[in-house]
């Protein structure tokens, strides 16, 4: 006897790995820092990268962030180093997300990130 009728019976739900969910959360924090300018996250704010030569790639992603130099393995695993790189890659592939809400941005990131 079934108490609740399930229309999706027999179908596997779309589950994402824990790392995928962490990456979505990390990029969402970067969105809140740089697009929404949430005050309690201002310590994570990174300066914009200054282009020494104007190229097409620079014109496509003018809001790329300066990625800090990471010389040690421990420093390479830190939040800012990892997610500034992901943020720049996201901007290069999806240049416009200025007027989006946090939920729309999360959906964009879920679709963009590799599984």
Image (cartoon, rainbow, N blue to C red):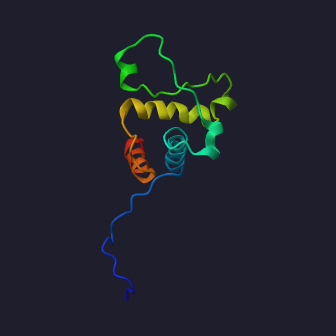
The quarter of the displayed image where residue 80 is located: top right
- Which quadrant holds the C terminus? top left
Instruction: Tell which residue pokes out farthest to the top in this image.
Output: 53
Asked whether, in this view, residue 7 is left or right of residue 66, the answer is left
Q: Pinpoint residue 113: horizontal percent, then vertical percent.
A: 42, 42
Compared with residue 36, is residue 45 higher up or lower down, i.e. above or below? Answer: above
Q: Pinpoint residue 60: horizontal percent, then vertical percent.
A: 36, 25
Compared with residue 4, is residue 66 higher up or lower down, i.e. above or below? Answer: above
The quarter of the displayed image where residue 99 is located: top left
Q: Residue at x 42, y 44 (%)?
A: 109
Nearer to us in this view, 107 or 61: 61
Q: How many labels, in total? A: 0
Q: Pinpoint residue 26: horizontal percent, then vertical percent.
A: 55, 44
Compared with residue 10, is residue 4 higher up or lower down, i.e. above or below? Answer: below
Nearer to us in this view, 31 or 107: 31
Q: Which residue is drawn at 47% across and 27% down?
A: 64
Asked whether, in this view, residue 8 is left or right of residue 71, the answer is left
Instruction: Tell which residue pokes out farthest to the left in this image.
Output: 7
Q: Residue at x 63, y 39 (%)?
A: 42
The quarter of the displayed image where residue 5 is located: bottom left
Asked whether, in this view, residue 48 is left or right of residue 70, the answer is left
Q: Pinpoint residue 1: horizontal percent, then vertical percent.
A: 37, 89
């Amino acid at each position: 006897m079934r108490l609740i009728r399930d229309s999706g019976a027999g179908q596997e739900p779309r589950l994402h790995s824990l790392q995928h969910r962490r990456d979505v959360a990390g990029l969402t924090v970067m969105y809140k820092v740089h697009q929404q300018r949430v005050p309690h996250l201002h310590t994570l704010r990174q300066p914009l990268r200054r282009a020494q030569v104007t190229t097409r790639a620079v014109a496509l992603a003018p809001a790329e962030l300066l990625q800090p130099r990471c010389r040690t393995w421990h420093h390479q695993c830190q939040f800012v180093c990892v997610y500034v790189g992901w943020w720049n890659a996201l901007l290069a592939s999806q240049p416009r997300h200025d007027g989006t809400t946090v939920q729309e941005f999360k959906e964009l990131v879920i679709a963009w990130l590799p599984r």
